[in-house]
Each structure stands twice: as C-alpha cells, then as structure tokens.
Image (tube, grey):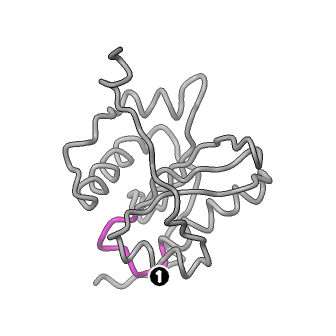
C-alpha cells in the first residue's frame, strides 16, 4: 500500500473538468458493487446535470497530484416530515487510497455542507454485504436502518403503460 501524506490530498468542490474522472470512479464503484453493466450515464449527461444551467447534483472531489482519487456526489431532496435533506448518492475512493483517511475527509466535507446548509438529514444507502462501508459508517456514528425497503421503477417501466 502506497504511503503518502494525507495533507497532500486536496478536498475541493468538483468542476466540469473532473467529469471524466467522475465517470471512471462511478464505473469502478459499479464493478465493486457487482453491477458493472448498469452504468448508463454519459459524460455529456454528467456535465449537463451537474454543471449546466440548472445543476441537479453537486460534487466534492479528493485530488492527489492533480488526479481525482475520490468523489462524493450529492443532491438535495425534500422530506415532508423534516424539510430539506441532503442525499449522498455516491461516495467512492480509488482502491489503492482506501484505509488512509481520504474517505473520512471526503465524508467530513459533505457533512460540513449539510451543516452549513442547515439540512434536517443527511442520507445515503449502503449494500447489506458491503462490510467495509458499513464499518466506516458505524465509525461515523450513523444510524443504519434495516426497516425500510427500497422502491424503484426503471426507465422501461416508466415508459410503459
């Protein structure tokens, strides 16, 4: 495992030039989550949706020597019970940089956004078999709720009847 100074990692707001690296990390996460063929989003869509006229997501990146080694992609959602919430959609660090504190710094940056924006909740999902992620979130004192089931309609279902 490569040793490096954690302070050499820059945590910053993402910019449109980061989109190719963002897509690579999204694809790497899909492989890790055993769904490599599920990524359909394109660089063009990521550019428009994150950096276009009406951005619908925000991006924080971890950078080392001008290379993106981690991302946290989030957006705002609304709870009828609580109000404005932040949803952490994807949070990933390149495998060779895990266990060095990069993820902790990225997660802390998202928490700071949530705090600054006075959201009522910060939420995310984690796969039940992803023990390293579960342990990470437990160290962050997160509540992991096994009671709620995820519901979903995919594009084809939405286009039908």
Left or right for 115, reference 146:
right
Magenta-span inclusion, residue 95: yes
Q: Position of residue 83 (x, y in %)?
A: 77, 44
Left or right for 60, reference 157:
right
Q: Looking at the figure, which quarter contains the N terminus?
A: bottom left
Q: Position of residue 47 (x, y in %)?
A: 45, 31
Q: Quadrant of residue 143?
A: bottom right
Q: Please name whichever residue, 142 or 73, is drawn nearer the observer in this view of the structure.
A: 142
Q: Looking at the figure, which quarter contains the C terminus?
A: top left
Q: Please name whichever residue, 130 or 44, is drawn nearer the observer in this view of the structure.
A: 130
- At x 53%, y 48%, the residue is 59
Range drawn in magenta = 93-102
Q: Position of residue 6 (x, y in %)?
A: 49, 79
Q: Quadrant of residue 41?
A: top left
Q: Secondary structure at mark 1?
A: loop
Identify whether 89 is placed above or below 19. below
Q: Position of residue 56 (x, y in %)?
A: 57, 33
For disc 1, the marked residue is 5
């Amino acid at each position: 495992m490569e040793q490096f100074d954690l302070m050499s990692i820059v945590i910053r707001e993402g910019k449109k030039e980061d989109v190719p690296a963002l897509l690579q990390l999204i694809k790497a996460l899909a492989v890790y989550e055993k769904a490599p063929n599920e990524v359909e989003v394109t660089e063009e869509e990521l550019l428009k949706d994150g950096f276009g006229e009406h951005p619908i997501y925000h991006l924080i990146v971890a950078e080392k020597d001008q290379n993106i080694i981690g991302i946290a992609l989030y957006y705002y959602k609304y709870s009828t019970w609580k109000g404005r919430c932040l949803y952490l959609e994807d949070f990933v660090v390149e495998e060779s940089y895990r266990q060095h504190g990069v993820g902790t710094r990225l997660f802390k940056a998202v928490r700071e956004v949530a705090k600054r924006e006075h959201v009522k909740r910060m939420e995310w999902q984690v796969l039940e078999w992803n023990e390293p992620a579960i342990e990470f979130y437990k160290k962050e004192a997160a509540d992991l709720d096994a009671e709620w089931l995820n519901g979903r309609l995919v594009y084809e279902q939405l286009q039908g009847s």
